Amino acid sequence: MPTLSRLAVIPRHIGKIKVLVLLAALSPVAGLGIDYYRDNLGFDPLDRITRSSGLVSLVLLLATLTITPLRHLLTGLMTRIHATHGKRLSDWNWLVKLRRTIGLLAFFYAAVHLLIYFWLDQGGSIEDVMLDLRERAFLAVGMLAFVMLVPLALTANNYMMARLGRNWRRLHRSVYLIAILSVAHFWMLTKVGVFAPLPYMFILTALLGWRLWYSWIPHARKMIDEGMEIPERAAGVYPVAQHENINKNPRREP
Amino acid sequence: MLRLGEKISAAEITPEAVYLERRRFMLGGAALALSALSGLGHAGCEHGNIPASSEPLTDIDAATHHNNYYEFSTDKKSVSRLAKDFNPRPWTVAVSGEVRKPKTYDIDELTRLVHPEERIYRLRCVEGWSMVVPWLGIPLCEVLRRADPTGKAKFVEFVSIKKPESMPGQRYASLSWPYTEGLRIDEAMHPLTMLVFGMYGKPLPNQNGAPLRLVVPWKYGFKSIKAIAQIRLVENQPLTSWSRSAPREYGFYANVNPAVAHPRWSQRRETRLGELSKRDTLPFNGYAEQVAPLYQGMDLVANF
């Protein structure tokens, strides 16, 4: 597998990959900006930019939840085909490093989504927003998801990871609930007879379902690395002690 | 009665067929007088005061490519494309039920029943967007009055065409097909209520409800049923498609009312198509002066 072995060099270019991910994820907002200047936002421009920002945020949020299952999938796949590289879970650690970038971008789009609603839809009136929140439950659900996303964005750095220690993981597990709330928000605002949120619901179900399944299989069969971010890994250091740490505190959830 | 927009000439807004038809009426001036007098023993349709609109018209491209028409698609952008091959001819419209003179009209007979009028109305969709459209049609009253409703005719039920082979959206149970709507008889007889077969001076495009649609400007857009095949006068309030599908969200009356909230769309404000900022929604979509008397003493929050 000479071609696949080249994958081994990826971690060395993680900086460039992060930039690529950043550019790719920012392209929707750039596209909207171009459409705005070309007066090409469609017949209901407010609806268009509100929906696009919300949808991109949801896609990026689901992408962060894909990293862990993807690492296991790729490891299994590489083992199956006897590739020279990629048979160890740690070979895919670079994916974990992308997760922070993607997660912060999800937060960025959620913030844009909220600001569009606040400034353009509600004319910047807190009073109107409060009235709106009381009338429409989907707004409250979306708002709750955003509020829960704020501490995750604020702690998405090595300093806070080191500082919060084990609590950092506990805090960041709330992303599962945030994702559920986001998909619920999408369903609740979707009109009768339309099923646009269905694919996102399936993907979220699969991603969370995988985690449930993984936490149920016998511990001995599990690969030692749970895919959670740790300060050392985020900083690009892969200490041997990592395995010992995890064995001391076996955790059931990936 | 014939209202022509200040900004557009008669030639621009009048389709050739209608224009020629109009000439025929005018030439035989007697015919026009006759049509106005043909009360058949009943009171004619009152003309009421049709409000003049000074608002800029919505871009025709927006009004014809941003359509809620579930018979074709639930995606507003796809409707015009999917409706392209729909054939609105031949077409008949049956007027039946609690009437002494039921009749099945050929569409071309119906559109020539009386002198067509152009009226510029606001149309407010329940989804929070709105447009200003020059419609071409006749008052619904003219058709109903000719059918000679009996004393039992308390409501009017409208039924759309069901044609899943050319209406792909009907292959899914997104709503109960055929689409059904209804009005109280006084709402149906109101001079603002129109049967429409043209817009922007052209025949009604398929995606906007060809060959014949209803336009009730003080109600949310879904009341203005498209592709009408049947008009039935009935004694009991008809069950409409949207009320059947989501009774708590879509009432029978569906009068534009900023005071009645919807679980998904704020009804306090609306986006005029093409605009980025919102404007306040007016009670009865701004037609309160004309239609509020219809609902005197009624609780419009309970009867939403």
Image (cartoon, coloured by chain):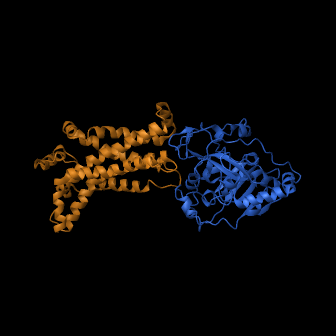
Chain colours: A orange, B blue
B27 versus A142 height, above or below: below
Where's the C terminus of chain B, which quadrant? top right
The image quarter in which residue A117 lies: top left
Residue B27 placement (x, y as % from top left): 83, 58
Residue B36 placement (x, y as % from top left): 84, 51
Q: Residue at x 77, y 60 (%)?
A: B21
Is residue A30 toward the left or the right of residue A8 in the image?
Answer: right
Q: Residue at x 61, y 65 (%)?
A: B86
A252 versus B83 height, above or below: above
Q: Nearer the viewer, residue B286 or B162?
A: B286
Decide if residue B78 is in sight here.
yes
Is residue B233 toward the left or the right of residue A139 in the image?
Answer: right
Q: Nearer the viewer, residue B49 or B125?
A: B49
Residue situated furthest top in the rendering:
A127
Residue B23 placement (x, y as % from top left): 79, 58
Is residue A206 toward the left or the right of residue A235 in the image?
Answer: right
Q: Nearer the viewer, residue A99 or A226?
A: A99
Is residue A154 toward the left or the right of residue B51 in the image?
Answer: left
Residue situated furthest right in the rendering:
B41
The image quarter in which residue B284 lies: top right
Residue A240 placement (x, y as % from top left): 10, 50
Q: Residue at x 42, y 49 (%)?
A: A52
Q: How many marks?
A: 0
Decide if residue B238 is in sight here.
no
A165 versus A222 height, above or below: above
